[in-house]
Image: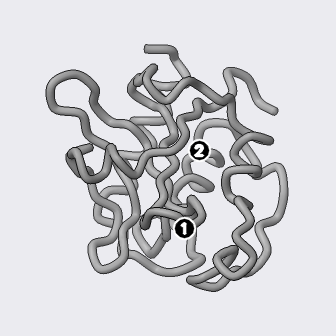
Amino acid sequence: MTVVAERVVTAARGWLGTPYVHQASARGAGADCLGLLRGIWREVIGPEPVAVPAYTMDWSEAGGREDLWEAARLWLVPKAPDEAAVGDVLLFRMREGAVAKHLGVQSATGAEPRFIHAYTGHGVIDSPLSEPWARRLVARFEFPQEKG
């Protein structure tokens, strides 16, 4: 595991128990899945590279735009979906045919893979990367190795 990946997972674990709050990014106070990744970025990399505009719960759905995927490609390092490593950023589609708009951080690989994510009704949790979740996985990224 790289130093950055180790720092990503350590930071993600620090957010466990944070309540789910749409558009929030404050460890211990509230976060959604994007807010969790934004907070980890601030802890590991530094200031966020761009301001995130306000967004609704159903953003991107009407136009079918892959806004989150495009942003991830811009600021993170794309990887092959089958090259799992601890610290990877995971991007999911919540429904078949829907835009990809749920994020998490791989916290364990191997026989019992897991990921940390902010999930509606649960807050920031460490979940099994079970078959239903694995089927929804559409992209995998890693944090850049240097401040960017």
Q: CA distance from mark 2 to mark 1?
A: 31 Å
Percent from the top left, x then y, of residue 136? Answer: 40, 52
Residue at screen point 82% across, 49% down: 49
Residue at screen point 32% across, 44% down: 134
Asked whether, in this view, residue 95 is left or right of residue 98, the answer is: left
Helix, strand or loop under label 2: helix
Color scheme of the displayed model: one colour
Location of residue 59 with respect to 2 vertically, above or below = below
Task: In the rendered structure, find residue 43 and report the number of the disc placed on it.
Answer: 2
Q: Disc 2 or disc 1, which is closer to the eye?
A: 1
Residue at screen point 82% across, 64% down: 51
Q: Residue furthest left?
A: 111
Task: In the rendered structure, find residue 98 and report the number of the disc placed on it.
Answer: 1
Quadrant the N terminus occupies: top left
Asked whether, in this view, residue 105 is left or right of residue 53, the answer is: left
Percent from the top left, x then y, of residue 59? Answer: 66, 78
Q: Nearer the viewer, residue 78 or 105?
A: 78
Q: Residue furthest front?
A: 97
Location of residue 11 with respect to 95 vertically, above or below = above
Characterize the local packing of mark 2: few (<14), some (14-19) or many (20 or more) Cα atoms within 10 angstroms: some
